[in-house]
Image (cartoon, rainbow, N blue to C red):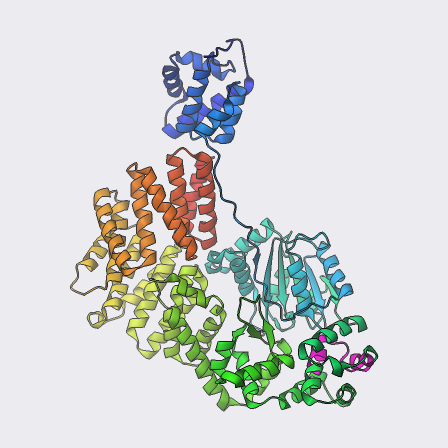
Amino acid sequence: MAVKSPANRSESFGRLLSGMISSLAYYEGKTSAVVEEELGMALAVVGKTIQRYKSGYLPPSDEAVRLLAEAAVRRGFLGREWLQRFLHAARYPFAEKLLDELCPAPQVRPRPPRVYENLPAPTYSQFVMRELAFAEVLDGLHQRSAAVLIVGLGGNGKTSLAREVAARCLRDDSETPRFDAVVWVSDKDRPGTTNLSMVLDEIARTLDYPGFAQFEHDEKRHEVEQLLRRQRVLLVVDNFETITDGALLAWLLRLPEPSKALITSREKHRGLWSSWLVDLRGMSEAEAWALISDRARVLKIDRLVGERTQLEPLLAATGGNPKALTMTLGLLKYERRPLQEVVDDLYAARGDLFDDLFTRAWALLDEAARRMLLVATFFPTSASGEALSATADVQGFAFDRAVERLADMALLDVQQADLRSPPRYVLHPLVRAFAGAKLGEQAGFETGARERWVGWCSILADSAGHRWDDLEKLNILDEEGETLYAAILWAFTNKHYQDVVSISNNVTYYYYVRGLWDRRLKTEVLRADAAQIIGDISHEIIALSNLIMISSRQGKDAESESIVKRLLTLKKLDSLPEGVYFRYYHALAFYQYSNGDISTALASWEALSVSNRQLSIHDRAIVLRWIGECLLLQRRMLEASNILQSTLDLAIVNNHQRTILFVKIRLAEIDLLQGRIGEGRQKVQECLSIAHRHKDRWYAAQAQYLLFRICLAECKLPAARIALVEAIDLFERLSMRRELAEARQALADLA
């Protein structure tokens, strides 16, 4: 054994040892003097010798250094970085070997970086670069002004330019300013409805903090502004000319740095004069020729376009407007006339250019294509071919021909992320306005079409529904979330209350699993009111029960109490179906549980489990799991373990995947509390794998926090910190406030 000279000193060693002793004293609730005596006994020296070491004198042997290092890690929860410095200051030989033994480096699997953006898929196959305008936008993004405003006539390509700029700002490209995320908001789908609150919600969802959307306005604004300060976010607000919310305008001009706003508008809004202005005019001859050449190849009319010398009259007639150019090429294909005749008609047209283009295009559509164009206005963002076909009642060859003609005439834009994805269809704002006006002239058609649209939404929602036994089924709703929500709103506004109840009943579980609390909250409110109007007490109870669960989880006590009072006014409970009866009493028990009254909640769930009402296997598993949770909180370990194991058996037989997650996490916690660390770790790892596969971040967050506690028990401090930071991130994103407060305190203690 190597022996050191007692005269050797190191001030760093003394400071690190003093900090270690203070850490032990804090965690173990002792005085520093007591800790020093204990360390002295372990090293077979008196307590005063430990004080000598604190003043900087190095221990005479390597074994003494090793014993101090072990105490620091196992009792003081000090990490790898501290230990590395301590061993270096103590001049310990083979320090790396002891470092890896006591504090092994965490094995973190690298994850691909996630890009936070909600950009719409491009509707153009090839972007025609507008060199001057593109450079002006980039120049504006480099300035100190909070907003860049792109102004131009309808169809001039503002949206395409903004989208291309935004996409390139996400790349590591020295030519464009680099942003960490892009949030896209457009008023084109529901003109005049975009406001500050909706923009804040969209930012929160896109940056993956859906829990923020449930906050009251001032708190939500504060939290979102903090996100915009922490990272460079490019907020794109498209079609600003129809937005009327003055609060949004004022907020955009004071957007927190380093984030920026990119705004498109047909008008030079007076309130935006302080922004960096980019005036987007018609295409130059070179740009127009590139667009026409590409479009003509797609339409297979290259031979009809002729020489480039014929372009000048077309440019003059359209003003170089890209939308007008593409529509003119569609007319050229289907009117089967020479280019010069088409151009002459454009010159001869009276009034607005697009009025003439749309009128002529409409005349070239057959009945199927017209129906397709009209129903496309129902879909707020984009529509699948299946949805358009069902809503317009156009199938087979007629559908394919209608889509081809609408796309050729630039009346329907095609979005396709890649060859593996089916195409989706969107409307340009000018086309949407035209089609909406035409729809208003055909009230009889709209009535039937709306019923088919709502019916399609209902069937789609039902196909996913409450698939607690197959959560991957929920993936089919990812593309249609906006459409389903729009259908619920339309049905409620137009007094189709049964449709509100039907769609809401099946879509709220999707919102629940995905953590889209704001959407679920609004949908449940509409369902409760619709059910009350039509006298459907069962669905009113289900909706109110879900609202109690949501508000209780969010800590909104006054709101929860109000909903409970409404629930208690409902009568004739004995005649309710078993599932509804269960929901009613389960919600009341959960309300008691959320208020911290564990004993009363336990009694309520136990009474429900032995009531004379026949519960389904699924509902019985839910009751038992909450009984187990209460027993666990009361530290009645054996009873809790037995109940939870029985629940797990039921859940596995019934393939109730979220109950399996819930129970395994609780059983892992019991393993931890009773010292079975390895078994607990295995269960937690299984839960994390399942939760990530099903995009169930509620349980992923809980499992991650339990993993932190397990790593802490194993004295794996670096791994514990990583798990805790992951848990805090999920708690914050989902706005799990109580869990977040506990985890943040744990991080402070760990530090």
Quadrant of the rendered structure where residue 263 is? bottom right
Q: In percent of the image, x 39 and y 43: which residue is there? A: 707
Does the magenta segment cover residue 138? no
Q: Residue furthest left?
A: 612
Is residue 313 shown in magenta?
yes
Q: Quadrant of residue 734?
A: bottom left
Closer-to-camera residue (385/537) = 385
Q: Residue at x 60, y 88 (%)?
A: 365
Prevailing secondary structure of the magenta residues: helix
| Residue 315 place in picture, x, y as percent | 79, 79
Left/right placement of residue 486 relative to residue 508 reads right
Q: Nearer the viewer, residue 4 or 746?
A: 4
Which region is colored magenta? Answer: 310-328
Using the image, determine if residue 700 lies above or below residue 510: above
- The percent position of residue 300, horizontal first and vertical second, equals 68, 80
From the top left corner, tell me how far across and down residue 247 is, in percent: 59, 64
**Drawn side of residue 661 relative to residue 224, left or right:** left
Residue 595 visible in the current orientation: no
Residue at position x 54%, y 83% from top? Answer: 372
- Residue 112 image point, x, y percent: 54, 50
Vertical arrangement, residue 563 with respect to residue 209, above or below: below
